[in-house]
Amino acid sequence: MGLDQYAFINPREEKRTDDEGKEYTVKFAQKDFYWRKHSRLQTFMEKRWVEKTGKDAVELNCQDMELNREDIIALVKAVNNGYADDFCEGGFFYGHQFQEQIVQEEKTTDLHFCEEALQALDDGQKVIYHCWW
């Protein structure tokens, strides 16, 4: 168990029916990204969630949050300064014990995501962040 994080570029949903006639939804994305226990990224996203929705940070769990250009530019700055303002105090499933290591290991992926997200936004596409723990 633990924190799983996703970003979807240009997501869409498709309704399908199983063999028993029960309808279900499948989510697709033009491009997607995945992180595991990247606690500082989560802390960054939780702050954005609170700013955008006024809801408590824990309510981000299992929700989609649409990211805009301002969010991505702020994320680039956070990545480049090692998420200095996004220290994770805890969270049982977040992996906060090794957050410094993850920041270093995921820097290339984080910046690649930001680059792809900015291009997608320029192209009129949506960028979604989703997490669950």
Image (tube, helix red, strand yellow):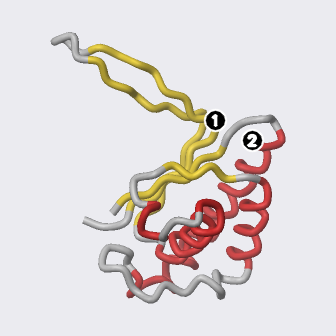
**Which element carries disc 2, helix, strand or loop?**
helix
Q: Residue furthest right?
A: 122
The residue at 43%/63% (across/down) is 59
Indicate which disc, 2 or 1, sits on the residue closer to the N terminus.
1
Question: Residue 133's spot in the image, x, y percent?
Answer: 33, 63
- Please give the residue where the numbered disc 1 appears in the rendered image: 10
Nearest to the observer: residue 58 or residue 126? 58
The residue at 65%/55% (across/down) is 113
- Please give the residue where the numbered disc 2 appears in the rendered image: 120
> What amino acid is at disc 1?
Asn
The residue at 72%/36% (across/down) is 125
Q: Residue furthest left?
A: 20
Nearest to the observer: residue 32 or residue 125? 125
**Which element carries disc 1, helix, strand or loop?**
strand
Q: CA distance from mark 2 to mark 1?
A: 8 Å
Question: Residue 22's spot in the image, x, y percent?
Answer: 23, 17
